Image (cartoon, rainbow, N blue to C red):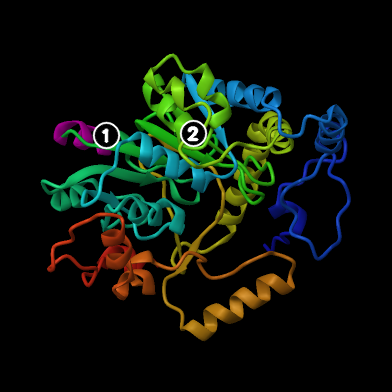
Amino acid sequence: MRVKLTLADLSGLPEGSFVRYTPIKMRASQNPWPIVSFKHVAAVMAETLKGDWSGLATVREFEARFKNYIGLPYALGFCNGTSAIYSALFALDLKPGEEVLVPAATFWASVVPILQFGALPVFVDCEDRQYGLDPEEIEKKITDQTRGIVVVHLWGIPSRIKEIKKIADKYGLWVLEDASHAHGAKVGDERVGRFGDISVFSFQTSKLCPAGEGGMALSAHLSLIEKMVLYGHYERIPELKTEFHGLAATGLGYKFRMSALSAVLGLVSLSQLDHWNRKRKERYEKLTSLLDPKKNGFLLSPAGTERVYYEYHLRYASAAPDQIDARIEALNRAGISAQRTRYPLLHQQPLFTSTLWREIAERKGARVPQDFNYSGSLPVTEKMA
């Protein structure tokens, strides 16, 4: 039996009767995400008419609702996820010469900011069948200089975060959880973003909870949030009940606050997040059922986790590069956006294969051992890519 899969099936558009989320008509050439609802438009218009475009009231409301959604007591909004990572590394007291264990298969913002603190990313291999860090490989890379681990839930698939957190606790390391792809994913009954010392989310337009631009840092520790306030939120420093209160007039030289217009978009997207996650899951599970598992490899979630679908990835069991390109072209002609994996492996990029990484770290105060380099391979990560 032949089954015809339409663009509407894959994009996750709701039924026309679901008026609350009826999308505004867009050009056929546009990516169907984000789904722009009348609710988004009305909220932005109302926020615009308030005139307080740089105000904090709507941002605070978004922080409150998002932290409740994740299940943590503290949240701080940012202009993007990258600035939230910078502030998190500052709050975690990262120092020159220290080492942080990181994946190579991720967006650069999960890793490169470490260099700007004079610290050194140490790449760790991932697990087969999903891109999460392999806990066994993590332990092999820990040294006297290791201070933390960056865990990324890539493409919406939870990493084995509970096992990684146990390793971190064993060695006295902090965990920075980058959940920028994983709004709504779960480990057991808990949403990802609850497990790190600090977790970071992105609300960039392509993300599952889009706000145009924006980021959020969350933590169970008020002291960490207060340090992040210092690093980019000078207007909130007067609210601090710490010795840093006196920095209100200057801050530390950074301005990372979220726009009220981004916050109001984020509030609407958050109210629709679970709905769209369910729709994506239905469509992608249908797609998976139509594909031959002998010819296609699928990324799998660890046991006891529930993934979300930021993106859907396939690995062809045996296909020449030109065959893969032909299949991608055919999918695009059919109206299904497809491309090769868009994140190049970071340890193979010029920043790390040249001496530039060393120059940056040393300029920031690191004394880098002469034998420290990025010449090693990550066999599983490279095979997965």
Q: Label 1, label 2: how many angstroms apart (C-alpha)?
A: 32 Å
Is residue 298 shown left or right of residue 126? right
377 shown above or below 265: below
315 shown above or below 95: below
Name the spot of residue 180 as percent of width and height, x first: 51, 44
Find the magenta span and give its range. Answer: 164-171
267 shown above or below 85: above
Residue that label 2 marks = 251
Residue that label 1 marks = 165
Residue 369 position by quadrant: bottom left
Q: At 43% across and 66% down in the image, what residue appears?
A: 294
Q: Are marks 1 and 2 in contact (CB under 8 Å)?
A: no
Q: Is residue 333 visible?
A: yes
Q: Secondary structure at mark 1?
A: helix
Res 143 label: none
Q: At 21% across and 48% down in the image, what residue appears?
A: 98
Q: At 56% across and 47% down in the image, what residue appears?
A: 309
Q: Is residue 71 visible?
A: no
Name the spot of residue 35 as percent of width and height, x first: 76, 46
Q: Does residue 170 belong to the magenta stretch? A: yes
Classify mark 2: residues with Cα within 10 Å, few (<14), some (14-19) or many (20+).
Answer: many
Residue 17 position by quadrant: top right
216 shown above or below 25: above
Identity of the amino acid at label 2? Gly
Q: At 51% across and 64% down in the image, what residue appears?
A: 292
**Quadrant that contains the C terminus:** bottom left
Name the spot of residue 142 as percent of width and height, x first: 15, 48
Q: Does residue 95 belong to the magenta stretch? A: no
Name the spot of residue 238 as percent of width and height, x first: 53, 19
